[in-house]
Structure formats: C-alpha cells, structure tokens
Image: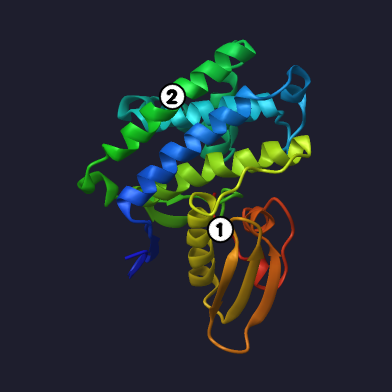
C-alpha cells in the first residue's frame, strides 16, 4: 500500500513497483552524470535555486547522497555525523547532512568529481536494490523541509522513491541555473512525474483536473468540479518541491 493509516498517523510508502523503481534509479544516476560531463568550466560556478549552492556544490551533495545509498556502513557514518552536528547547531539534520556531503567533496578537481559521480551511480543503484524487505518495512521520521513538520516514512519510500527524486530535481536545478532545457522522456521522467502526481493527489485528497505539458506530461483527474490546473510537468514538480510558490492545490508539498 502507498500509505498506511495507524494510530500514529499516515505512513508514506513507495507506490512504485520495486523493479521499476530500481530501473528509474539506475537511469537517473546515469543522466545526472551525463549532465555533469557536459558542463563548461564557468558553468560549475553558477548559482542554483538551492540557497548558497553553486552547481559544483550541488554535484558534491548528489555524490554524497549516492555514496550514502551505496552501502549501509556509509549511510550510518553520514547519519551519525549529521545527527551530532544538528545537536550542536540546532539546525535540521537534513541540512547538516547535505552540508557535510558538499564539504566532503570540495577538495576534488572537476574531472575527479565527474568521474566519482559516474562511478558511484551503479554502486548506489545496486546498494538500494540490496535493501532487504525487513529493513524496507521499518518506519523513519522525516522532519520536513523546515525541520518542524514531521511525517512518517517507510525506509522503502526513502530507498525506492526519494533517493531517485533527489537527483532528478537537482538535474532540473542545474538546467534552470544554466538556462537550458532538462532532458525529459516519457519512458523515464514520465514515470517519475506520474508517481509525483499520484502522491500529490493523495496528500491533498480533493478533486482536480490536471494537465501537464512536455515529454513527461499527461492528463490526470479525480472527482468532479475540482480545481483545473495546466502547466509544464517540470515546473509542476518544482512548485511542489517548494522551489516556487504555489496556490490552491499547488500549495501541497511533495518531498523530493
């Protein structure tokens, strides 16, 4: 089930078929590495929509998150360090984790960084595939984008869904920062967007008619007399992630 309702509230779970989720993961890591491999020297310094991060910082974070996904010992090391840092600073643990990942890779040259991202992708996909069912069924608490709006996730939701949405959104961030179109296909990005739409509909629980344009787009609806929305598929995801302001049903947050 995509969500479960217990005495402790809603628990978010992956709605993707496991095999489909792992194919999406492997392809997204490959696409992210391909984007980095095509950047010019000056483009690495471009600011992104993530405050304080350049394209290079974003690549360092994405490399660190892929390393976290590649093995349980590395996941534990990063989480322990981030937890300790959060206790000292009072900041959300996810902020400390991403800062740690950026700092860890600052010493790498651009060619070394590109090679590391290219090398870690298959290892991260394989590491996620190896997560056993018992572990995937465990429940964790995500503190939300502000650190103060917690919700419960299964580990499977993190492994199968969030860890692919994260590099996908950062691939979009890089495209936006450089003023170039993001590579989108129906067979890959369309599957990811469809999953985001389903979760968005579940989270707000109201009728809607949604038309998303572009290669990853489509039309979805639920109920009658709902809010009619039409916009680009990539922009739809960026708004739900909090990167742009949304009103009405578009104010519904979906984690990436």
Q: Nearer the viewer, residue 79 or 165?
A: 165
Taking the spot 38% from the left edge, 44% from the top edge, the residue there is: 23
The image shows residue 230, relative to residue 196, as above or below, that is: below
Front of the two marks 2 and 1: 2
Circle 2 — which element? helix
Which residue in the structure is indicated by mark 2? 120
Q: Is residue 199 left or right of residue 52?
A: left
Circle 1 — which element? loop
Taking the spot 33% from the left edge, 56% from the top edge, the residue there is: 17
Quadrant in the picture for residue 163? top left
Q: Position of residue 95 (x, y in %)?
A: 58, 36
Taking the spot 75% from the left edge, 37% from the top edge, the residue there is: 177
Taking the spot 58% from the left edge, 71% from the top edge, the residue there is: 219
- Residue 220 in view here: yes
Q: Is residue 8 left or right of residue 180?
A: left
Q: Position of residue 71 (x, y in %)?
A: 33, 28
Which residue in the structure is indicated by mark 1? 254
Q: Position of residue 34 (x, y in %)?
A: 57, 29
Q: Quadrant of the N terminus?
A: bottom left
- Residue 50 in view here: no
The image shows residue 155, relative to residue 252, as above or below, that is: above
Quadrant in the picture for residue 232? bottom right
Q: Position of residue 44 (x, y in %)?
A: 72, 23
């Amino acid at each position: 089930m995509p969500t479960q309702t217990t005495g402790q509230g809603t628990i978010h779970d992956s709605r993707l078929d496991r095999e489909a989720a792992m194919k999406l993961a492997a392809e997204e890591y490959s696409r992210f590495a391909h984007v980095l491999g095509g950047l010019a020297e000056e483009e690495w310094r471009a600011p992104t929509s993530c405050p304080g991060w350049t394209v290079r910082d974003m690549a360092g974070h994405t490399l660190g998150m892929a390393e976290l996904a590649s093995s349980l010992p590395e996941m534990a090391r990063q989480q322990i360090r981030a937890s300790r840092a959060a206790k000292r600073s009072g900041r959300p643990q996810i902020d400390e984790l991403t800062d740690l990942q950026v700092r860890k890779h600052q010493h790498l040259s651009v060619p070394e960084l590109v090679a590391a991202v290219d090398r870690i992708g298959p290892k991260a996909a394989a590491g996620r595939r190896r997560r056993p069912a018992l572990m995937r069924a465990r429940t964790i608490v995500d503190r939300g984008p502000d650190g103060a709006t917690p919700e419960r996730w299964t580990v499977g939701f993190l492994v199968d869904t969030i860890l692919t949405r994260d590099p996908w959104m950062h691939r979009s961030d890089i495209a936006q920062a450089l003023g170039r179109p993001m590579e989108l296909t129906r067979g890959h990005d369309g599957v990811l967007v469809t999953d985001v739409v389903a979760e968005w509909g579940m989270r707000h629980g109201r009728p809607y008619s949604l038309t998303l344009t572009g290669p990853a787009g489509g039309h979805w609806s639920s109920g009658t007399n709902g809010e009619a929305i039409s916009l680009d598929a990539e922009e739809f995801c960026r708004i739900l992630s909090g990167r742009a302001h949304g009103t009405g049903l578009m104010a519904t947050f979906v984690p990436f």
